[in-house]
Image: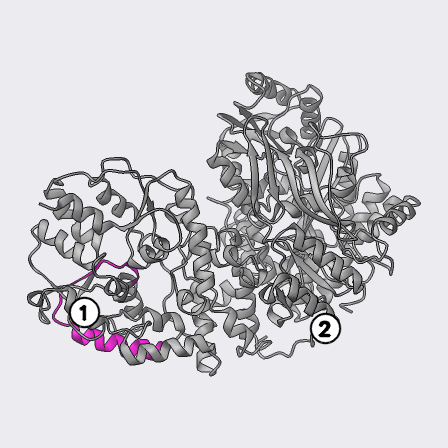
Amino acid sequence: MSQARSSPAGLGPHVRALKHCTYCPKLCRFCCPTAEAERSETVTPWFKMTLAELTRLGRRAPAGGPAEVFQHCLGCLHCRTHCRHQNDVPGALLAARAVALEAGAAPPATTALLERFRARGNPWGEDLAAARSAAVPAELLVPEAQAVLFPGCQALRAPARHLTPLLGLLAALGVEHVGVFSGPEVCCGAPLWQAGDLQGLRAHGRALAQRLAPARTILCPCPTCAWVLGVVLREAGCAPSGQVVTLDAFLAPFLRAREPARQVPGRWVFHDPCYLTRYLERGETTRQALQGALREPLLESAWSGQDAACCGGGGLVPHSLPGVARQAAALRAAQLEASGAEGVVTACPGCVRQLGEAGPLPVKDWVELLAEAYAP
Amino acid sequence: MPGMPAPATVFPELPASLLSALRAKLGEEHVSTREEDLLACSRDMWPRSLIRQRAGAIEHPPAAVVWPGDEAQVAEVVRLAGAHGAPVVPFGAGSGVCGGTLPVRGGLILDLKRLDRILALDERDRLLEVEVGVMGEVLERELVRRGFSLGHFPSSILCSTVGGWLAGRSAGQCSSRFGKIEDIVRSLRWVDAAGRVRETCLRPCGVSPGSLDALLLGSEGTLGVLTSARLAVWPLARERWLRAFRFPDVDAGLRAMAGMLRAGLRPSVLRLYDEFDTLLARSGKDDAGDPRESLSASLPALALPARALLARSLPMVLRAPRLLNRVTGLLPTGCLLVVIVEGGLAGGQAWRLAAERIPALCVREGASDAGEGPALHWWKNRYAISYKQSGLFSAGAFVDTMEVAATWDRLPRLYRAVRKALEPLAFVMAHFSHAYREGGSIYFTFAGAAEDDAGAAVLYDRIWDAAQAVVLSAGATVSHHHGVGFSKARYLVRQLGPAQALAEHLKASLDPAGSMNPGKLGLGGGGAGEAHHGQAR
């Protein structure tokens, strides 16, 4: 797993990275999705870190401009792919946001998001528990299950595209022992973490941990949830006791044991979700699992794997800076289209939504293709 | 130190009528006077600015930043700024090292990164038409995807734009094969100081009588704003021959390099490192970040405890540069020459012939064949050197580079004279990385430290003055591929001598209001390039 820090515990732990970025000639800027989308010096990793360093030194107050600038990071970690210092820019900017929040200087969009989260337990303020009840057969909503599927809020916003095919796939593969998480905490808490609300994150994490206490295995089809439940909450001291498992790891033995009923036609290009590939380092295993279900070899874009561009769906950017998120998605969609593929396949509900709205190619969750291939 | 008060930053202002007009033409979101946007464009990578920033000083903030979306909007901005007498500073990625984008007279930063389209790629005629705001690495990757390469690989490729390359006459690591950017350009589009869109004639080769290209290339925005260019591209190399040779000294290596070029051989990469730079070039598993670590790792003769001590106390060690230069000068490393010849280009089998002849030429000058390893190591780490800057500045020291050029007969003396001049002031090393039939460039790297940042700025100026005095007296050029900008303006003025008046006349005729990037290249009056002296004292 990536060694990225996950706790916004003040800027102190980030001094080395802050200094190195401040004096760096902007060597990662070309791969920063917000810098490329906005074409502004202000949102390059170099200047965001410079501003955070000035804040740490007391030369700039976080209120106003700096707090707003700290939001312009998708948390994609692409910068680190090209940083020989292995600086954790997203981690430092999370810490900077926490400093701003603590100082009462969070931007209005962040404050509004946190209010929505407090009201409904997810960043959209939607009733996603009801959506889950509508999509999941009641017999699967078992609070005391030892293996629990945690769909995540992104999947619950479009259950027909993510949750329904996944349940179908599990049934087709003969997986019978997995229940679906039934607690009111439909979100892993990533938005709280990304907003710098460490206190809120801990409270949310403790509630989740309590609800998930019976589970020995927590299956996370969403890579962001897998990272937050498996790493962030552990570092925050409120992790669930069960083992967090990514979907590719969970499915691997079942896929090995069974041939697909059919291979899905078409030329598909794979989009690496940032948390899957750069944080969890499961991009390759996901590709391998997917390839068996396809008739044609999986295509790659010119920017793929550790070098894949973010779709614009990371962090709080889709909530607080929707125009930036759309522009980043458009840039990524163009890269994927240039591969000559007929469709895009990815492994994150957030990426499916972002890319689906950005380009002409159809975009599928990989569970949709697997479900199609293994359907009886 | 945390909490230490920084000098107050004074932000210049523009007439409200100009800002309103700009917002009406470009859109509200593409004109900013927000402090954060101004700070982000208040310096480039001129190391002296980094020293001053470390001390808390923001010396050259602009009054506004604008982001035009196309060439027509660039013209609008230039016209409006001209009408209001506001300086205009074209800006790409701000990675220049000579202060070329510092708004030393305030005014507007004209950020060109929204002009980042690849307009056309003619695969048959191998011509690329591209806007100036595209990042180098992004462009090269797109070309590679389509089976081509620009052949232009400056070590700043990750953080520079096409416009920056054109404005500063950049050179890539494969310059001995593909030439500098001016050899790759086939035509330019630009906006003149009156806000009129101009285009130079499309030419089939690098030099054309009467073309304005020679004037605009390297003009650093002082005559107008470049907006797009047509550039030659090459099919991707299919084969690559890599080899390194170890020479007893710099002179022998230079003779071998000159011999290759005079024999008509055109390796893509031809780089000779002096003794200490050879150590750095070879050091490390992959040349990563912290120069304190790589410096100590480069000294195999030192015992481990001594290396550890050196790594921790680099700034202190750098304050005794004479001793450090002498000690490292005694190490028996030899001088490494990296040669890379590429095949599958237009030259057919010529590359194979070159690869066969090069070893004999090197051996004749006393070299031993070091095999493929060091060259492969260099290739894999060819952009790594830029990461070392951060560690040195973070540690309280500073580092800079000086690239000058001369004919083959002058290069060895120039190399020794600059070294001698700098030995009491800074730790110094050099490599020779852009070679031509008649001569080449020397790329000096110097690192220094002082008791505090004010002292560091003074020392930094002394180093440059001492080095450039030698350069000028040796008949070398004050710059080769980093441009002149603000920092070298006074040296260029001295180099031009009486011809400076001609340059001023030319500037006055093309930019009568003097609004285009004033104070750069020694143009625009007011003691350009001298201003920074005394600021830190």
Quadrant for residue A256, please give it: top left
Callouts 2 and 1 on one subunit: no
Quarter of the image for residue A61 reads bottom right
Residue B101 visible to an observer of this rendering: no
Measured along the vertical axis of the image, is residue B407 above or below residue A60? above
Where are the magenta residues, as a range? A197-224
Residue B173 horizontal side relative to residue A351, left or right? right
Q: Is residue B103 left or right of residue A168?
A: right
The extreme front residue here reads B24
Image position, residue A229 (x, y; %): 26, 66
- Left or right, residue B488 beside residue A269: right
Find residue B36 and report its horizontal and vertical position in percent: 60, 69
| Residue A170 appears in the rendering | yes
Q: Amino acid at mark 1?
A: Ser
Is-magenta flag for residue B8? no
**Number of labelled discs?**
2
Q: Chain of mark 1?
A: A
Q: Which residue shows up at 35% across the image and 73% down it? A: A192
Amino acid type shown at disc 2: Ala
* Disc 1 residue crowd, few under 14, some 14–19, many 20+, Cα 10 Å: some
Q: Answer above or below: position of B290 versus B444.
A: below
Give the Cα separation between the discs numbered 2 and 1. 61 Å
Quarter of the picture holding the C terminus of chain A: top left
Residue at mark 2: chain: B
Q: Secondary structure at mark 1?
A: loop
Crowding near pointer 2: few (<14 within 10 Å), some, many (20+)?
few
- Viewer-nearest residue: A304 or B226: B226
The disc placed on residue B16 is 2
Question: Farthest residue in the bottom direction?
Answer: A104
Q: Which residue is mark 1?
A: A241
Residue closer to the observer: A179 or B130: B130
